[in-house]
Amino acid sequence: MEKNSFTPAPAPSLALAIFALALGSFAIGMSEFSIMGLLAEVCQSMSVTLAQGSHFISAYAIGVVIGAPLFSLLTTQLQRKHQLMLFMALFLVGNAASVLATSYHALVLARFVSGLPHGAFLGVAALAAASLVSPDRRGKAVGNVLLGLTLASLLGNPLAAMLGEYINWRWAFGTVALIALVDVALIAAIFPKTAQEPGGSPLKEIKALMDRRIWLTLGIAAIGFGGMFSVISYISPVVTYAVHLSHSWLPVILFAFGLGMVAGNLAGGWAADKKVMLSIFCVLLWSIAVLLLFPLLAPTLFGAMLGSFLIGTNLALCAPLQVRLMQVAGNAQTLAATLNHSAFNIANALGASVGAYVVANGYPVTYTATYGAILPLLGLGIFLLSLLDARATRTRDVVLTPEA
């Protein structure tokens, strides 16, 4: 918990610090999503199938799943400034290795290394941003940091696709590595001392994870969010094989997807402030409907753009789940914040795997959405379990609480 006597950073320092955190978020988002638009070129370069190429996506996601809780615990006694610099430096190394990779296995390993600091950086960055402002402005500060991820989908990923189309896919990862290098320097130079507070006790945070409400919330994220990735992981072959367009149209489709993510992020934040549990339920239903609709829209250019926009709106699930996790995490706020990113990247890996099953078995590539709808359906089942658990907990509390 932050101390109530904490003095927010001066406005210039605050703006620069938030910018540095958002820039790191932008680099992470560009690295995570750009491979999806470059998948066809990368597979051709490495002489592997699309199904094998899904490992470039899932290796990154597995790195996030492992690295987020591991790094948050191993570095908990470091100042946040030094944590952030360490995480971004490792991210730089992973993306530089992606540029230099000359074989399938080397690129899979490089992507895994790139993913290791992903969740830890975003989790600590959110806490650092919140520590820079007064309590009534923390939500906006955290949102500004995560805005980098949204802008990466809107601007960074179409840029990466253009680099891959007109120059070489390695330039996309080289651009990410350059941004990461700049961000390390920015954090070192301008991040204010007021945010350099040591973390809490790892043992206390681990003990706080015994609350099953945390795991049910993480379960919704890990499974229910996977449908979006089952489609966007294979958006490149959708453009060429389903819509029958040249690869030069891919940045346009990715831009539509990015707009959808922006809209979903705004809608999810608004909904979370109203009714958290109701918003989670509605977004899961929306996700199922959008995924089932996508194959009907995809065969035309306008339909593919509209379908990609609608797929992007699935990001609306993030804010309500994050708010719910903050409600139930108790003393495990730091570890839960990083585990949340692990959960979302389990969804990434699951979605890519579902898509790999579809293409490996010769189904139309648009069926990645049809099969992907299974994941939010399963997430809806976990959500219903969480409702039953909450009702049982309230009933037990009423029975055990003495009458006044």
Image: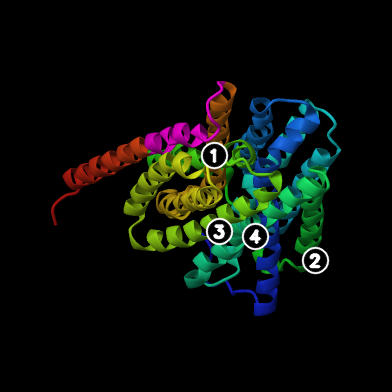
Mark toward the start of the polypeptide (2 vs 3): 2
Residue plotted at (38% across, 60% down): 271
Q: Residues within 10 Å of mark 3 (few under 14, many from 20)?
A: many
Circle 1 residue:
231
Q: Earlier in the sequence, mark 2 or mark 1?
A: 2
- With 268 as the anchor, is 111 left or right in this view? right
Q: Marks 4 and 2, how far apart in space?
A: 17 Å
- Which residue in the protein does label 2 denote? 189
* Gap between marks 4 and 1 measured at Cα: 40 Å
The earlier-in-sequence mark between 3 and 1 is: 1
The Cα–Cα distance between marks 4 and 3, rounded to whole angstroms, is 36 Å
Membership of 391 in magenta stretch: no
Q: Residues within 10 Å of mark 4 (few under 14, many from 20)?
A: some
The percent coordinates of residue 161 (x first, y second) are 72, 48
Classify mark 3: helix, strand or loop: helix
**Seen in the image, is 344 located left or right of residue 50?**
left
Q: Which residues are magenta?
A: 361-379
| Dominant SS in magenta | helix
Task: Report the residue marked by disc 3.
Answer: 259
Label 2 and label 3: CA atoms lie apart by: 33 Å
Which circle's residue, 4 or 3, is located before the other in the chain? 4
Please name which of the two marks, 2 or 1, marks the residue nearer to the observer.
1
- Position of residue 395 relative to residue 274, above or below, is above
Contact between labelled residues 1 and 2, with CB atoms less than 8 Å apart = no
Label 1 Cα crowd, 10 Å radius (few <14 / some 14-19 / many 20+)? many
Q: Which residue is mark 4?
A: 197
Mark nearest the camera among 4 and 2 is 2
